[in-house]
Image: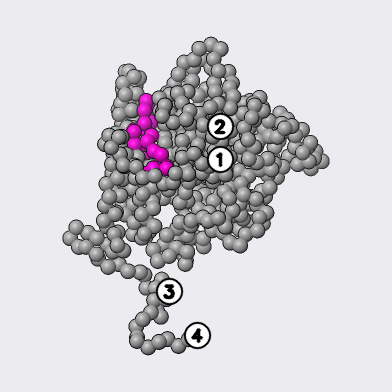
Amino acid sequence: MKKNSVKKWHIATTLVTGLLFTSQALACTTFIITPGATESGAMYVGHSDDGHLNDPRLVYVPAADHQPGSTRPVYFDATSIGELPEYGSFVYRRYTGSDRGPGYVNTRVPQSKPVGFIPQVAHTYAYFDGNYGIMNEHQLMFGECTNGTKMGNVKPSPKHLFYSAELARVALERCKTAREAVELIGHLIDTYGFHGTGETLPVADPKEGWLIEMVPGDDSFGGLWVAQRIPDGEMVVSANELRIREVDPNNPDQLFSPNLHKVAQAKGWWKPEDGQLDWLRAVSLGEYNHPYYSLRRVWRVMDKLAPSLHLSPWVKDGYTRDYPLTITPDHKVTRHEVLHLLRDHYEGTEFDMTKGVAAGPFGVPYRYLGPYESAGDVADPKAHHDGAWQRPLSVYYCTYSFICEGRSWLPDAIGGLLWFGLSKPSETAYTPLYVGTTKVAEPYSTADPRYYTRDSAFWAFNFVENWAAINYSGVHQDIVDVRDPLEKEHFQAVAQADKEALSLFKQNPAAATAYLTEFSVNTAQNVFETWQNFADMLIVKYADGGMNYPGELNHKVGYPQEWLKTTSWVNGPTTYEQPEAK
């Protein structure tokens, strides 16, 4: 379909130039599972970008060479503290310009303006980019989640140049290993400062994983950071609360700001007589938004992978030590299990969101937030709460999610896989894309959350997610019936593609690149077309409250008897007599 023939539906004119949110920090969940904990020996980094109709485009940023003495612009990201139009960065279009290759070029809209500049390097690597940097050609992988801290919503300035999204991009451009990336990010924060909110970036290469956490500064300091290596054979999960605790200068597996202790002491956050500095307690107020907003997700992932620990979902407070930074899974985790970690609404637990009055007759796990709710993952943890919903791993306002898979036994171009899924994790189909590609299928790099279009994979998946609310138990099963065989086919196709690409790579790396590009683009295009056709089928099947099939229209489904008994149906008009007043 030609772009100029695509029908667009405008959501609201105020979204074009107005602020979409005062703060874009809406929450994410992220994790690392190290090679020693996985069945195949692969490294996994997972991330759900729960940004609620922010920019869903997956963009390939090509490698580039740069002239001596040139500079690298640093741009503002609206995902940090909301839109600042003076920088030309918006939640619906994260960046526009030519500095990240042709994928972001659009001369018809306002161009992004740098906050500042840093020295450029001679050569930068290719990588996949989203609202945060994702994965580069050397299998360097990132995730992300936002955290509340005592220093929050700091605006960009010459003294606070970077936000975590740009830090990840610079690292992807310049680094091959996780340790190199952590050291570079720390150096950039120490040298140029950090703005926005508290942030966690899981960073991994095929052999080693790190967690780096950072907080913005004020007029007296640029920012602070702490990083910790994740032992092989273990995993870590982070969900909008800082996870690193004691900072030990003698720990070879930790790195941190050289001025951390000095600043913490000057701010009254820590005293030497307290012993080792507790990073979480020193720079934050614990868990934000409402109790268990973060910790229940941490518990859920840990309990799914290591039920033998018998971790309780109930803790004393937001500073609990009941959930260690890392755990060892009870068994070697499979790729299939990794792809399902974020597809969870606490099914089968006391918090099951498909059960109860709020789930309605068809077990809908979505809980739409209103103006009476706390505002995102940096909301005041001391605010009064009249009520709250459970915060699941798969949330209705997820823009996209992904699993990076790094495999050390293969050349980087073949070993690096990005499993990318648009919209809600429980309703998406993950698509495999090799880092050895040179482009992204157009439906995956085409989207504007202000307009519905038929050429966008995001809108195909988002439509199905929203249509599922009509009859979740039915539509979700339809999704599973399409999704699971599709992903199984992807596993088999990847295994064959690995062999083909490796054979080509040994003879001619350029031929392998061409093959991997064709595979990735064709696979993504097939997923998009499958989901588009699937969405069209659902419109008919669930029209007007019935179940419609080619040979039978309006097969009456009605409501489950158990749910009916809780409604006014039992007192409905079954007689002409007027009911007695109660």
* Model colouring: one colour
Span shown in magenta: 428-452
Q: Which residue lies furthest to the top in this view?
A: 68
Q: Nearer the viewer, residue 392 or 506?
A: 392
Which is in the foreground here, disc 3 or disc 2? Answer: 2
Pick whichever of labels 3 and 1 is earlier in the sequence. Answer: 1
Residue picked out by circle 2 = 86
Whether residue 538 is visible: yes
Circle number at residue 65: none
Q: How crowded is mark 3: few (under 14 residues within 10 Å), some or many (20 or more)?
A: few
Pick whichever of labels 4 and 2 is earlier in the sequence. Answer: 2
Q: Where is residue 191 in the image (x, y as percent from the top left)?
A: 66, 24
Image marks 1 and 4: residues in contact by CB distance under 8 Å = no
Pick whichever of labels 3 and 4 is earlier in the sequence. Answer: 3
Q: What is the quadrant of residue 254 in the picture?
A: top right
- The correct choice, above or below, for 495 with respect to 63 in the image is below
Question: Could you give the CA–CA distance between mark 3 and mark 1, rounded to whole angstroms?
Answer: 42 Å
Helix, strand or loop status at disc 3: loop
- The kind of residue tagged 2 is Glu
Helix, strand or loop status at disc 1: loop
Residue picked out by circle 4 = 582
Pick whichever of labels 3 and 2 is earlier in the sequence. Answer: 2
Residue picked out by circle 1 = 82
Image marks 4 and 2: residues in contact by CB distance under 8 Å = no
Q: How crowded is mark 1: few (under 14 residues within 10 Å), some or many (20 or more)?
A: many
Question: Could you give the CA–CA distance between mark 1 and mark 2, rounded to whole angstroms?
Answer: 12 Å
The residue lying at 35 percent from left, 19 percent from top is 509
Residue picked out by circle 3 = 567
Image marks 3 and 4: residues in contact by CB distance under 8 Å = no
- The kind of residue tagged 1 is Gly
- The kind of residue tagged 3 is Thr
